Amino acid sequence: MLTLSSMTLKCTEITQKIEEFISEQVDNAGLYGAVVAVSGGIDSAVTLSLTARALGPERVRAVTMPERDITPKRDITDVMQLVTSLNVTCDTVEITPVMDVMREILPLYDASRRVEFGNLKARTRMIFSYHYANSLNSMVMGSSNRTEWLTGYFTKHGDGGVDLMPIADLYKNQVKQLAKYLEVPENIIKKPPSAGFWRGQTDEGELGISYDTLDLILYGVDSGMTADEISEDLKLERAVVQGVFDRVRRNEHKRRLPLILRLRKSHS
């Protein structure tokens, strides 16, 4: 039976594994530290906390990139509270001027296509993150979780454009468990998740399904269950479950490197 309790983490063990992963990857690359883009949401808060524990706060730079009139003031306040508690240096880079220029110069810009313009925001933040990483001899940490990763709920070459994804094998519910273990501020844990593409946007509103239900469906997918089996187990309409299956399949291209057509003959 699919239940959230079956997804309970051994937080101490998982935390240690993630910290070792971060430390080993940064050291093996011969780099000094890590850059984490923080939004005020739970995923980036957990990622920053784990990275600071793994490398030490002096080797971590947090960067928050708000947009005027879009980013809630609460998010900025939450970021500052978090980085202060972790003793991590945080820079604030306002992306509004860049977005204003894009609105003016992009030939196909259409204000009604909010997701497409939101993707430009995510890619702009990726550019700034790598500016910091290059300047500070650091890696860029990603904050995507497994729920987002499987459903494609991230921007290709945006928040998906990173060097490491320390929590991408954890479902959203498991990220919450880890956040509590790491003592992430409660106001961040309880905040409705949002990509911040427009005012009032929420992840669950855009996905059309709650994260808990989505996690359970994906847990069933990962366990090898069919859509019919998951539908029966969770007492959900089959169309809802099949919609998740279809979304995972459609977004396969976002989870892999570009495909290369092999034209040369093999010498084997």
Image (tube, grey):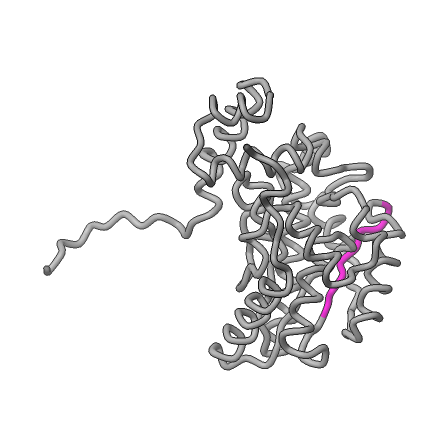
Q: 7 or 60, which is in the foreground?
A: 7
x, y (%) of residue 109?
Answer: 66, 37
Q: 198 or 201, which is in the foreground?
A: 201
Q: Quadrant of the C terminus?
A: bottom left
Q: Which residues are magenta?
A: 62-69
x, y (%) of residue 178?
Answer: 68, 57
Q: Quadrant of the N terminus?
A: top right
Above or below residue 266? Residue 105 is above
Reply yes or no: does residue 64 show up in magenta.
Answer: yes
Q: Residue 141 lies in what quarter of the image?
A: bottom right
Q: Is residue 4 left or right of residue 230?
A: right
Q: Residue at x 78, y 42 (%)?
A: 192
Q: Residue 60 lies in what quarter of the image?
A: bottom right
Q: Residue at x 78, y 51 (%)?
A: 189
Above or below residue 203? Residue 258 is below
Q: 100 or 227, which is in the foreground?
A: 227
x, y (%) of residue 162?
Answer: 56, 60
x, y (%) of residue 161?
Answer: 55, 56
Above or below residue 60? Residue 190 is above
Reply yes or no: does residue 50 show up in magenta.
Answer: no
Q: Residue furthest left?
A: 268
Above or below residue 94? Residue 34 is below
Q: Main secondary structure of the magenta part?
A: loop
Q: Residue at x 75, y 37 (%)?
A: 202
Q: Residue at x 60, y 52 (%)?
A: 144
Q: 86 or 219, which is in the foreground?
A: 219
Disc count in the image? 0
